[in-house]
Image (tube, rainbow, N blue to C red):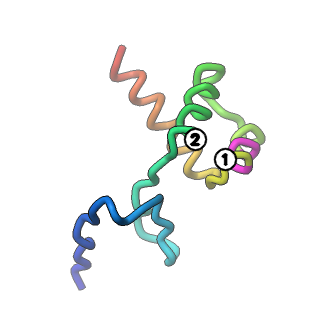
Amino acid sequence: GAEQPPPEGGPECPGPEEPGGRGGRRLRTAFSAEQLSTLESSFQRQQYLGAAERRRLAGRMGLSEVQIKTWFQNRRMKLKRQL
């Protein structure tokens, strides 16, 4: 059937959502300011992360490697657009 996305929650629904089921698109992750500054400073040092570095960051920040990888991809795209 056609799945309806849930209505946009107000400010009273906190935090990044972890969808339970595998497969399908993830909901957008809300990174904390702290996570963003960590990601940004890593990006300043190197725009491309190796697998080991990504694993280390993911573990340190409590995010999945996929989230880190995606953030870096998006950040590189953003940089390209700005140029």
Main secondary structure of the magenta stretch: helix
Specify start and end residues of the magenta stretch as a single range.
55-59
Q: Do the residues labelled 1 and 2 touch (CB within 8 Å)?
A: yes
- The residue lying toward the viewer, choosing from 49 and 32, is 32
The type of residue carrying mark 1 is Met
Q: Is mark 2 on a helix, strand or loop?
A: helix
Q: Which residue is rendered at x = 41% and y = 30% of the image?
A: 77
Q: How many marks?
A: 2
- Across and down, in percent, residue 19 comes to 47, 71
Q: Distance between the residues labelled 1 and 2?
A: 7 Å
- The residue lying toward the viewer, choosing from 45 and 50, is 45
From what the image shows, is residue 17 above or below residue 3?
Answer: above
From what the image shows, is residue 8 above or below residue 51?
Answer: below
Identify the residue under disc 1: 61
- Across and down, in percent, residue 81 comes to 34, 23
The extreme top residue here reads 83
Identify the residue under disc 2: 35
